[in-house]
Amino acid sequence: MTELAAVKAALKTQAVETPSWAYGNSGTRFKVFAQAGVPRDPWEKLDDAGKVHEFTGVAPTVALHIPWDKVDGADGYAELAEHAKRRGVRLGAINSNTFQDDDYKLGSICHPDAAVRRKAVDHLLECVDIMDATGSRDLKLWFADGTNYPGQDDVRERQDRLAEGLAEVYERLGDDQRMLLEYKFFEPAFYTTDVPDWGTAYAHCLKLGPKAQVVVDTGHHAPGTNIEFIVATLLREGKLGAFDFNSRFYADDDLMVGAADPFQLFRIMYEVVRGGGFTSEVAFMLDQCHNIEAKIPAIIRSVMNVQEATAKALLVDREALRAAQLAGDVLEANAVLMDAYNTDVRPLLAEVREEMGLDPDPLGAYRRSGWAAKIVEERVGGKQAGWGA
């Protein structure tokens, strides 16, 4: 039997990193719907992130995206880090952007033009400089690089360019810094994507060395892909560095994690727990776009969904599961997992929050706080943060 005290102790150590961009306006490639009270700069994003952590207790870090969260000079980032501290949070992973400049139409560090590759690598090196200023551990890399047509470029040469660029950035990393390489099945390139799957990301990270790890974005796979198998394999190889949690129905939908398939999230979290990945060495990050829903409540709900899936994974009776597996009892093994998944863990999490000095109902506490009305009233004028469409 699983000891509830141990489950509660583990849940109290959980940390879910929220993304700065999820607090701003976002949308589809057709339209971005602006919302009243949305932050206008990185400082206000941190104000909102502080509220998420205040009510959940498990969202202590905020990922930045450069240049979306760019401030002036190293002193500016030090001030931003200090502002985060005053709001009860810390700055987390630094996310690069090599996909929004016109120069990157044919790719960034895989581009056939050496001058464009130089520009992209210089941006990645700038991100490491920002890590130095903020005290961030992780540099997160996602590349939109790829081709749309057969023959458009040399597929193998693009891998060589990718390896060369990554190696230069890897050498710049400090002793306590990491490179997290993300992959994506397709989009915006439709014929070939230069980092399309976990195998490609793993191969590059393996060659680079121990400071290079793979990021699993739960929305970046072909339909029917067994993501928990990928998680188990990367953990086994010591190469799982982080998650980007979100949900999908069709492609990279970036919906709230656990919204589309909570059973999948549970299965993933079980492999994390079973494989020894429930540690600070595996970063649990959200990567979501809240297009039509209110930002802060959606992020709070996402954090709660991760907590619920984790609690259920921790409740799996692993001794009973192992016994059924060794006995070849297929139905009993499945039943052990399903018993844990079907457990209503909300009362357990309410107890955990109360023991942490928190309101047992984070969403209710946020709604009662008056923060939503306050930011609508105060954040008037200026340009809202987000990306246009």
Image (spheres, rainbow, N blue to C red):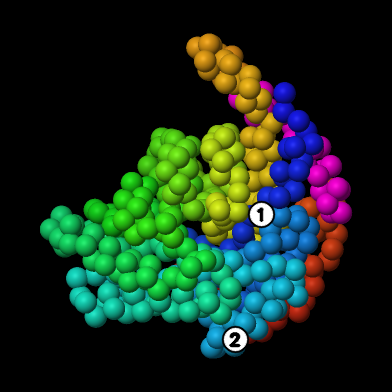
Q: Is residue 213 left or right of residue 300?
A: left
- Which residue is farthest front? 175
| Residue 47 percent coordinates (x, y) | 71, 72
Q: Which amino acid lies under the numbered mark 1 shown in the image of this protein? A: Ala
Q: Residues within 10 Å of mark 1 (few under 14, many from 20)?
A: many
Q: Is residue 254 magenta?
A: no
Q: Which residue is mark 2?
A: 76
Q: Indicate whether 93 appears above or below 149.
A: below
Q: Are marks 2 and 1 in contact (CB under 8 Å)?
A: no
| Residue 102 appearing in the image | no
- Identify the residue at image location x=24%, y=53%: 191
Q: Which amino acid lies under the numbered mark 2 shown in the image of this protein? A: Gly
Q: Which region is colored magenta? A: 337-358
**What is the secondary structure assignment of the residue under circle 2?**
helix
Q: Which residue is mark 1?
A: 15
- Which residue is farthest left? 151
**Is the magenta region chiefly helix, strand or loop?**
helix
Q: Is residue 345 magenta?
A: yes
| Residue 342 percent coordinates (x, y) | 68, 27
